[in-house]
Image (cartoon, rainbow, N blue to C red):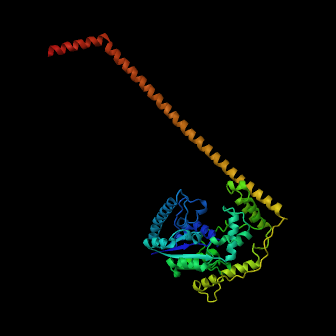
Amino acid sequence: MATVYLHIGTPKTGTSAIQHFLIENRETIKQFGYCLPDLYFGFGMPFLEKNGHVLVHRYRRETVEQSRKEYREGVDRAFEVLEQAAKEYDNIILTEEEIWKDCNSIKNFWKDLMARFDRIGCSVKVVVYLRRQDQIVESLWNQWVKSFYRTTISFREWLDKKKYSYYPMDYYGHLMKIAKYVGKENIIVRVYEKSRFEGDEQSIFSDFFQTIGLPLTDDYKRDTTSTNHGLKNNFIELKRMINGIPEYKEVQDFLRRPVLYASDYADKVDHAPKNTMFSYEEQLALMKEFEETNRKVAVEFLGREDGILFTEPMNELPMWKWNPDTVSRDLLLIMGEAFITQEKKRVHQQETLETLVKEMRSARGKIDAQQKRLDAQKLLIENQQKQIRTLQSQVDSMYRNPVFRAYRKVRKLIKGERG
């Protein structure tokens, strides 16, 4: 029986890094009996490395029934691939951090999923990383400002109106909902704190690999480039302002990456002390709300009798402030990154155009060569037709010749006498 390790995040716990690492080393992990099946069914680039996304993909169709039908068909296709993988490998890895949240919006998600895995003879281990709730709240707001959500609300409004409440932060309650169908013993809870990472490297990679029993050797490709940074300092407020421009809402979010790259670059050349959008009192108050649920997770899922889920101290950090001294530089960096991005696109388009022109010329040359061959064949056919007409004319002329006509008369007379 194959074991499926279903990695469900949560978001903002190094999931993008894990997914990128796995996809880069898909062939290597096969040597150890682990399969990362390709279940990418053209969902778009953001989901290319999330092979578990098919389980929660939202199809935007004309009717709800059409959307549900296409969802079921997509999952059916996925399980056909998984069934074959289970015959060849002892371990299967599926990863998609949005399952933690989106499983709530799909009726009977865990019940139906476990039934499907049971039918193809697979056992399931759910792997989930938990991060301190105050960090999640701030990180989610940052993500909403930075990415395609393009939110314009301030962090204060986000916090006061509990806009983050769509995200399951009652960790114990949510884990118990999953455990009802998966089994409590089949849920592996890890804590997203650098001091708690296990394995030789004590990194998110070594921790995840050790969790699923996969060796982490020197054979793996190491691309540690992070692609999911949050915006820092002035850049988060600048992006929030950009999001509020009416005309910008009507076009593609083309400044998202330039702002992110500018933020990363500014942080490298002028690294500012870590800060937070919270006041210390707000952080303490928020974490107080989740004190009991966190205690239960620590005791029942991690066996920690002290009931402490997160061990890293909650230090009092300075609150984020707008820095007018660097705003001109920051705007210049955004403009520079935007121009660089446009230039890269222009160069890419120019190279693509030149390649197309070469291909067109090559195709034109082949067409011309083919046309020449056709013209030669046409000329040959015309010459043959002329020869046929000449022969036909000669035959007709021979039949009209008086000598030939006399010959035919004599031959008839001879045949008549013999008859």
Answer left or right for 304 relative to 112.
right
Residue sitting at x 51%, y 66%: 37
From where the camera sits, is residue 76 visible?
Answer: yes
Measured as percent of width and height from the top left, residue 149 is found at 66, 62
Residue 332: % across, % down:
80, 58
Q: Is residue 118 above or below residue 236?
A: below
Q: Nearer the viewer, residue 125 or 204?
A: 125
Q: Position of residue 330 (x, y in %)?
A: 80, 62
Residue that extends furthest to the bottom in the rendered view of this protein: 305
Residue reaching furthest to the front: 161
Side of 43 where 158 appears, left or right: right
| Residue depicted at 21% across the width and 14% down the height | 412
- Image position of 47 with respect to 164: above or below: above
Q: Quadrant of the N terminus?
A: bottom left
Marks counted in the figure total: 0
User: Would you say residue 14 is visible in this rendering?
Assistant: no
Nearest the viewer among 100 and 87 is 100
Q: Residue furthest right?
A: 325
353 w.r.t. 72: above or below: above
* Residue 354: x %, y % from top left: 65, 45
Which quadrant, please, contains the C terminus? Answer: top left
Q: To which quarter of the image does residue 273 belong?
A: bottom right
When asked about the image quadrant of residue 21, the answer is: bottom right
